Image (spheres, grey):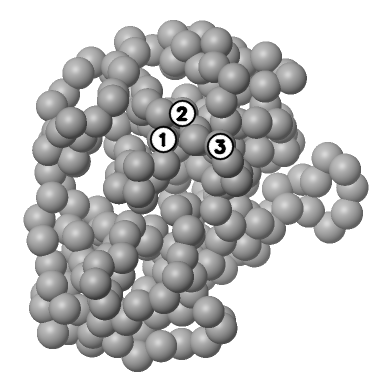
Amino acid sequence: MENFVVESSIISRKEIVGFAGRKYAEIEIDNIFDFEPGQYLMICTENREVEWPYPYFLQRKTECKVTVLAEEHQDLYQSQSGDRIRFWGPRGTSPLQPGRVPVLVADPAVGFILAPFLKEGQYQKLCVIGKESPSPMLTGMNVLYCDDIQTVAEKVSEENSQIIAALNPDNAEAFSECVKKERKEDIFLYISNKKACGLDGCKGCYLHDQNGGFGINVCCKGPFLPLSSVDFERDRGCLEQFV
C-alpha cells in the first residue's frame, strides 16, 4: 500500500480478555489490503487533544475489513463503532521467513503483539514467561508456560526453528544473555516499551548498525529485529525510551 493517509471509520469493536486477564479491544476498520503478521498501521483517532498517530498491530483480515488490537490504555480502545479515523500503512517488515514456522516467546504484558501469528496459525508453539493464567485468546493453542526467562531461553535453544519474541526491555536483555551467539541471527525480537510516536513525536528510532552505515531504522526495518543486531550496551538508553 502507498504510504499516504487514508480516511476511514470503525465498523465494529469487540472486548477481548488476553494474557494474564488484560483487556483489549479488537477494532474492525472499514478498509482491506494485504499485510503480513508483524506489520502495523499508524492510526490517528479523533478522541485526543493532539492529532498524532499511534502504531497498532494488524491482527487479521475479515471478509472485507481488517482488524487491529488496542490495549486498555490506548486511544483506539476508547473508540466506538462509527467513529472516524485516519491511518497510513501497513508499515514495518514481517519477521516470517518463507517455508519456516516459528516458535513464539512472550511476556504476558505484550503477548497480544503476537496475536497475528497465532490467528494465522503461523507458529509451532507459544512460550509464555510466568505461571499459567487461562486466557480465551489462547484457548486450544499450544502454549508452554515457563517460570523465568532463563528457562525460556533454554527451551528455545533446543529448537532448530526460527524464534519470534515480544519482551520487555529487561527480559529482552536477559534473554539475549542466555541464548547462544550462533542462535541470535535466527531470533527476531520486539522490545516493548514507550514509543516516541505514542508520545506525540518522532525520535527517529535508530539502533547502532554493527556492520557500519547510518543505523537501523526500527519502525521501518523492524519492528521485529534480529537479536544479533541489538547492542544492549550501546543502545540501552534508546531502548528505555522509545524503541
Residue 236 coordinates in the image, percent (x, y): 63, 36
Q: Answer above or below: position of 47 versus 158.
A: below
Residue 232 coordinates in the image, percent (x, y): 66, 31
Q: Which residue is mark 1?
A: 123
Identified at 56% across, 83% down, the residue is 2
**Mark with earlier residue (1, 3):** 3
Identified at 16% across, 24% down, the residue is 133
Q: Which residue is mark 2?
A: 103
- Element type at mark 1: loop
The alpha-carbon separation of the residues under discs 1 and 2 comes to 6 Å
CB under 8 Å between discs 1 and 2 = yes
CB under 8 Å between discs 1 and 3 = no
Is residue 52 visible in this depiction of the protein? Answer: no
**Mark with earlier residue (1, 2):** 2
Is residue 35 visible in this depiction of the protein? Answer: yes
Query: How busy is the neighbourhood of tag 1: few (under 14 within 10 Å), some, or many (20 plus)?
Result: many
Q: Which residue is mark 3?
A: 100
Callout 2 amino acid: Val
- Element type at mark 2: strand
Q: In the image as oriented, which residue stretches furthest toward the right?
A: 212
Identified at 13% across, 27% down, the residue is 134
What is the tally of numbered marks visible in this picture?
A: 3
